[in-house]
Amino acid sequence: MKPRILIVDDEVRMQRLFEINLSPKYEVLTCGDGEEALEVIKTRDVTLLVTDLRMPRMNGMDLLHEVRRTHPDLPVIITTAYGTIGGAVQAIKEGAVDYILKPVKMDEMDLLIEKTLSLGRLQDENRQLRQELKAIYGPQNIIGQHPSMQKVIQLIRQVAATKTIVLIQGESGTGKELVARAIHYESDRSSKPFVVINCAAIPGNLLESELFGHEKGAFTGAVKTKKGRLELADKGTVFFDEIGEMPKELQVKILRVLEEQKFQRVGGTEDIEVDNRIIAASNKDLKQAVEADTFRDDLYYRLNVITIFLPPLRERKEDIPLLVEHFLEKHRGIVKKKIAGVSEGARQVLMNYPWPGNVRELENSLLRGLVLCRSEFIEVEDLPEELRQPDKGEKITIAADREGLKRQKKQAQQKIKEEMEKDFIIEALKKGEGNIQRSASLVDMDRRQFQNLIKKYGISKKDFAKN
C-alpha cells in the first residue's frame, strides 16, 4: 500500500504539480486550505502532510497547531516563499519536521519526503519496541501469588508514576533488576533510557568515569570527551545495582546527584544538569553497612525513601509451581522436543530445596532439566545434583584451635536461637491472627519487643490475618 500524502496549497497549479510528480510513488490527496485539510485528516489515514504557510481561511501555521493537537505523530513539511522563511523556521520550532522553499524543485521534494517517511518508520518501530519491552518487563510479568509478592507488585504500580527514589533490598537472585525495570516501564519515562550500573562489577577506579564521563585529557588514555551513564540516561531511569559495593569516596558524589541532579565530568569544571529517576538495589542490609562504617549514613537516608523488600524463594514456596510453569513456557523453544512439565518426584525436589540462589537458581535448574530430559517430563535425575542431595556439598570446616571451636559453637547456638525465635513468632502470629497486640499478649511478651522480632526476621503480619 502506497503512503498517503496530503498536499495543502491554495494554488491549483501547485496541487497539480505535486500530483503529477508524486503519484507514481505515493497516493496524493490535495486541498486548498487548512479547514479543508482538517476534514480530510478526520476521515482518511494520512501518512504525511505538506502545507503552504500562506493560505485563505486557515493558514499553514494554524493548521500545524491543530494537527499537533489532534494528530501529534503526523509529520508536517512546510512549503514557503523566500519572504516567509522566518515563519517556516518558527513552524519547525513548533513541530514541523522541515521546510522547503518555493518554487519547489521536485527532486529535492522527493528526497525530503523519503527522508521524512523513513524517520517516521523508525519512530513507529521504536514505539512498537517500547510496547514490547513494556509487555516483557511490566509488573504483570512478575510471578507470585504469595502476599509478600502481591505487596511488591502493588508498590511497583504505586511508585512508578512518581519520581521518588526507590531502594530494592533482597538476596541475590530474587529479581531486583526485574523490579527496577518494571517500575521504569510502568512509568512515564518508559520511552527514555533505562541504564544499569553494576557497582560490584566495575572496578572502583573506573566507576567514577563510567558514571560521570570524562573530559579529553583528564587522565592517561582519555583521548576524547566521553559522556557518562548518568548523562546518557537523561530523562530516563538509572539503576544502581549492588550500590552497597560502591566505594565510600564515590558515595558523596552520588549524594550530590540525588540532591541536586548535578555533577561534573572527571577533569571537568562545569556542572552538568540531568533529570534522572534513581533506583538502587542491594543484597546487603545497608543499615548494617552504615553501622559497620562501609556505607555513608547520609546516602542511606537519601536512598531510603521507598524501600521494596524482595522475599527469598524459600519464604514463598507456594510460588514455585507458578515459576516452574513460567520458566518452562519461556524456555521450551530451546529444545526440539515436547516437554509437558516436571514429574511428581522432581516437583517434590523443587519444593523441598532451600534455594540459596533464589529465582535465578530455579530458572537455571529448569534450563538444565529441559536440555537433559529424555521424556516429556523433567525427572529427578535431570535436575542438578545439589538439588537432589542438598546436604552433600555442605562442607564442615574443622576448627584449627580451641578458640576456633568456641567461635563455631557460638555461631551454631546463635543460628539455632534465631530459628527458634522465628518459629516462635510465626506460631504466635498464627494464634493471634496477625494482630500484634493480641499475639504478644498470648505469649506474654512486650508489644515493642514482639514487633522488633517481627522486623528482625522480615515476617509479614498480613500473612496471618484472618480474611
Image: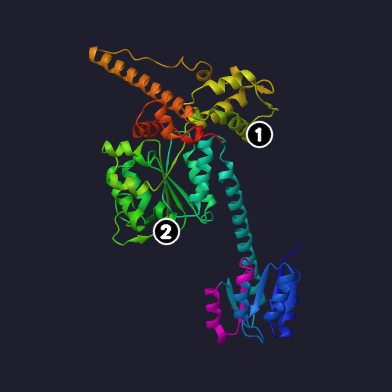
Q: Is residue 209 left or right of residue 34?
A: left
Give the position of the N terminus as an image quadrant: bottom right
Q: Is residue 202 left or right of residue 94?
A: left
Q: Mark 2 or mark 1, which is nearer to you? A: 2
Q: Secondary structure at mark 2?
A: loop
Q: Is residue 27 left or right of residue 224?
A: right
What is the x, y in percent for residue 271?
Answer: 32, 61
Give the position of the C terminus as an image quadrant: top right
42, 207: nearer the viewer? 42
Residue ID at (56%, 79%): 88
Residue 102, disc: none
59, 316: nearer the viewer? 316
Is the residue 380 above or below the residue 20 in the image? above
291, 151: nearer the viewer? 151
Q: Residues within 10 Å of mark 2 (few under 14, many from 20)?
A: some
Is residue 139 rendered magenta in the image? no
Q: Secondary structure at mark 1?
A: helix
Looking at numbered disc 1 in the image, what kind of residue is underneath it?
A: Gly
205, 255: nearer the viewer? 255
Q: Residues within 10 Å of mark 1 (few under 14, many from 20)?
A: few
Looking at numbered disc 2 in the image, what kind of residue is underneath it?
A: Asp
Q: Can I make out residue 215 in this image?
A: no
Is the residue 62 above or below the residue 133 in the image? below
Q: Which residues are magenta?
A: 68-94
Is residue 81 rendered magenta in the image? yes
Residue ID at (53%, 36%): 147
Q: Is residue 110 left or right of residue 1?
A: left
Query: Label 2, on which residue?
Result: 275
Q: Quadrant of residue 62?
A: bottom right
What is the x, y in percent for residue 143?
Answer: 57, 37
Residue ID at (29%, 48%): 298
Query: Label 1, on which residue?
Result: 333
